[in-house]
Amino acid sequence: MCGRYVMATPASDLVALFEIDESGDGLPEPNWNIPPTTTVPIVVEPSPRDETPPIRRLEAARWGLVPAWADDPSIGVRAFNARAETAAEKPMFRDAVRERRALVPADGWYEWQKQAETKTPHYIHGEAPISFAGLYAWWKQPDGFWLLSTTILTTAAAGELAGIHERMPVVVSAEMRDAWLDPTEDGEAALGAVVAEAAETAESLTMHVVDRRVGNVRETGAGLMAPINPA
């Protein structure tokens, strides 16, 4: 799963890395301990309404998907992750799989390894910012404004990651990002493609034990990512 992650890379760097055409307002500040319901940056490429090419945007979204048919935004509290195996079938996510796929930029994420009576947090990351396969939705608020929200897709953990947790976020390789965002691509086929390469992509990641302070949402700062001696 993915319940906490790090996104500290400046928005200006994300614009270059993800070849952004336009940036939205209210992009969040760097955060080294992001929990669900936090505002996070996402990359989207909505279908154009005319014959113009799609515009790739960097937007601020609430982490926890709130579908258009929801009665209130609290439904997003339990929809911060979506299982890739069933997302195309679930009413909560299936429309987004077809039409509203996103990339969720991250520097890495935290995962807890259960061993007997203890749980040990690990930080998992690449050599450069990575991107999770995400979905997004728009929900009209009572005040008439629109809420943009997102969820992160997960799959069965592979390689060394399987020794930490049974699930992992679907990390999209740089080569697959365009196809994942492309609104003309078949959504289920795109989902199958990124999941199929997830195990290989995971092999490029590294991990180390970090301080248990990451379990406290009030803790922040780059020091949370620092390796510590497990002993």
Image: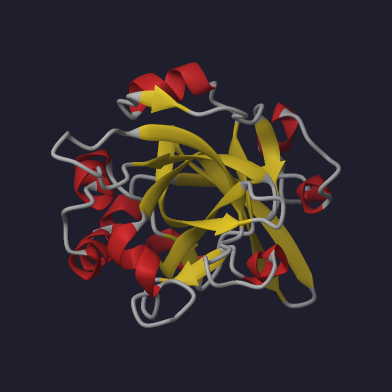
Work out whether 139 lies above or below 207. Answer: below
Residue 117 position (above or below residue 3): below
Question: Residue 48: x, y in percent?
Answer: 25, 42
Looking at the image, can residue 13 be seen? yes
Q: Is residue 5 above or below residue 75?
A: above
Q: Position of residue 162 (x, y in %)?
A: 46, 68
Q: Nearer the viewer, residue 170 or 121?
A: 170
Residue 16 appears left or right of 188: right
Residue at (31% x, 60% y) in the render: 99
Determine the residue positioned at 39% across, 49% down.
102
| Residue at the front extreme of this rendering | 144
* Residue plotted at (64% across, 31% down): 28
Residue at horizontal 77 percent and vertical 45 percent from the top:
211
- Could you tell me residue 100's position as x and y percent? 36, 56
Name the quarter where the N terminus is drawn.
Answer: bottom right
Q: On screen, 63 above or below 17?
A: below
Colour setting: secondary structure
Q: Is residue 18 left or right of residue 111?
A: left
